Image (cartoon, rainbow, N blue to C red):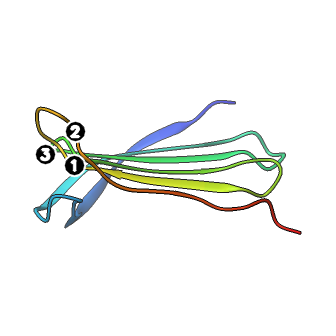
């Protein structure tokens, strides 16, 4: 797996600020997909899709404790 990193235009970060940042995307061609946004303010959003179809997403606010604002895990699809 070789991912790519690129800058993205300003959008609303988990903290509410409108900022840009870097986007990292990667996949293995067999179902694993990694999508991570790192905002210039220090916030992060992640989305990981796994081979079995489950998906995890997370939004993390910047700051001393990096507060997790949302953390969702989908069930395995039937």
Q: CA distance from mark 1 to mark 2?
A: 5 Å
**Pointer 1 local density, CA inside 10 Å: few below 14, some 14–19, many at least 20:** many
**Pointer 3 local density, CA inside 10 Å: few below 14, some 14–19, many at least 20:** some
Quadrant position of residue 17: bottom left
Quadrant position of residue 64: top left
* Residue ID for mark 3: 41
Q: Nearer the viewer, mark 2 or mark 3?
A: 2
Residue 47 at x, y = what percent? 52, 53
Q: CA distance from mark 2 to mark 3?
A: 12 Å
Q: CA distance from mark 1 to mark 3?
A: 9 Å
Residue appearing at x 57%, y 35% in the figure: 3
* Residue ID for mark 1: 61
Residue 22 at x, y = what percent? 32, 44
Please say if the residues under marks 1 and 2 sit with CB atoms less than 8 Å apart.
Answer: yes
Q: Nearer the viewer, residue 15 or 37?
A: 15
Point out the image quarter for the N terminus: top right
The residue tagged with tag 2: helix, strand or loop? loop
Q: Nearer the viewer, residue 4 or 59?
A: 59
- Tell me, for residue 44, which label it has, or none: none
- Tell me, for residue 66, which label it has, or none: 2
Classify residue 61 as left or right of residue 71.
left
Residue 6 at x, y = what percent? 39, 45
The residue tagged with tag 3: helix, strand or loop? loop
Residue appearing at x 51%, y 39% in the figure: 4
Q: Nearer the viewer, mark 1 or mark 3?
A: 1
Residue appearing at x 82%, y 66% in the figure: 77
Say which label, 2 or 3, has the lower sequence index: 3
């Amino acid at each position: 797996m070789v991912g790519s990193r690129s800058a993205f235009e300003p959008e609303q970060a988990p903290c509410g600020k409108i900022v840009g940042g870097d986007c990292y995307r990667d996949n293995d061609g067999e179902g694993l997909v990694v999508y991570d946004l790192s905002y210039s303010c220090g916030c992060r959003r992640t989305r990981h899709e796994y081979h079995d179809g489950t998906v995890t997403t997370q939004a993390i606010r910047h700051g001393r404790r990096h507060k997790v604002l949302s953390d969702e895990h989908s069930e395995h699809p039937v």
